[in-house]
Image (spheres, helix red, strand yellow):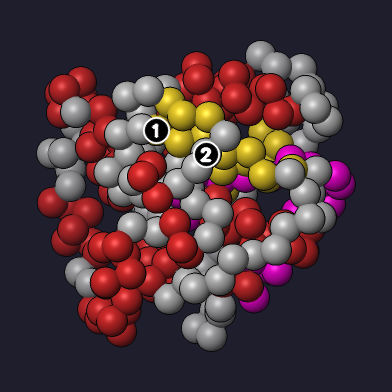
Amino acid sequence: MHGNSTPLILFSGLAADREVFAPQSLAFENLIVPSWPVPESDDTLDSYSERLAGELGQFGPAVIGGASFGGIVALHVAKHLDPLAVILIGSVRSSDELPRSAKWSRRLQPLVSLLPVRLMQIACVPIGSKMVGRWFPHLGGLARQFRHSDSKVFKWSLSRILDWDSTPRVDCPIYHIHGDRDMVLPIRHISPTQIVAGGGHVISLTHANEVNAFIGSVLKRY
């Protein structure tokens, strides 16, 4: 257990909940994982993040961050919260770092509302089993996240990824850890602070020791 008293606020990724940071919750007693509020119908990424920042201001100067889409949200929250630093875990700093598949899919954004999320979650149950997890930990981790996601939050978040075209200006240091086998956000588009050998997209679960050490090294600076 790390004893640093600096608040650590981490946002889970697309279709994920606080369980994606289960190993970090055991290692950092000061960890806060906000739940995802249901977005308003007209919420932009910035308006949503500003509302989150207003709720988190009570914790004072903090290190914030997130996994995947949570890292993108953290960058936008940072514009309104003035954190000590931002930690990205398998995420990106700007829309330029998104893979080509995400950019090509932008024209499909209006169809996101039609996705049968509940049926998709049911279909993912076998993939998220312990047996699959032993052989394919990256795939199993993604499936477990998706199974427990809120469908409205999932659709809104996916839409915001597809129409994201900005690079948030953040006036604090950004520290970035990324797996070299991440198939969702391939590392060839990214220049992280630290690379996790063999790490996929859910390194907070599959490579917890490396991620915890990285987070701990950042917190020691503050």
Q: Is 87 covered by the magenta stretch?
A: no
Q: Residues under labels 2 and 1: Cα distance?
A: 9 Å
Q: Residue 43 location, x and y as percent?
A: 56, 79
Q: Is residue 70 above or below residue 135?
A: below
Q: Residue at x 43, y 76 (%)?
A: 163
The foreground one among 210 and 39 is 210
Q: Secondary structure at mark 1?
A: strand
Q: Amino acid at mark 1?
A: Gly
Q: Residue at x 50, y 42 (%)?
A: 191
Report the magenta residues as a range. 47-70
Q: Residue at x 29, y 62 (%)?
A: 100
Q: Earlier in the sequence, mark 2 or mark 1?
A: 1
Q: Is 53 covered by the magenta stretch?
A: yes
Name which quarter of the figure residue 19 lies in.
top left
Whether residue 150 appears in this view of the structure is no
Q: Amino acid at mark 2?
A: Pro
Residue 179: image tag: 1
Residue 106 as seen in the image, left or right of residue 168: left
Q: Which residue is mark 2?
A: 192
Q: Is residue 102 above or below residue 192?
A: below
Q: Residue at x 39, y 33 (%)?
A: 179
Q: Secondary structure at mark 2?
A: loop
Quarter the C terminus occupies:
top right
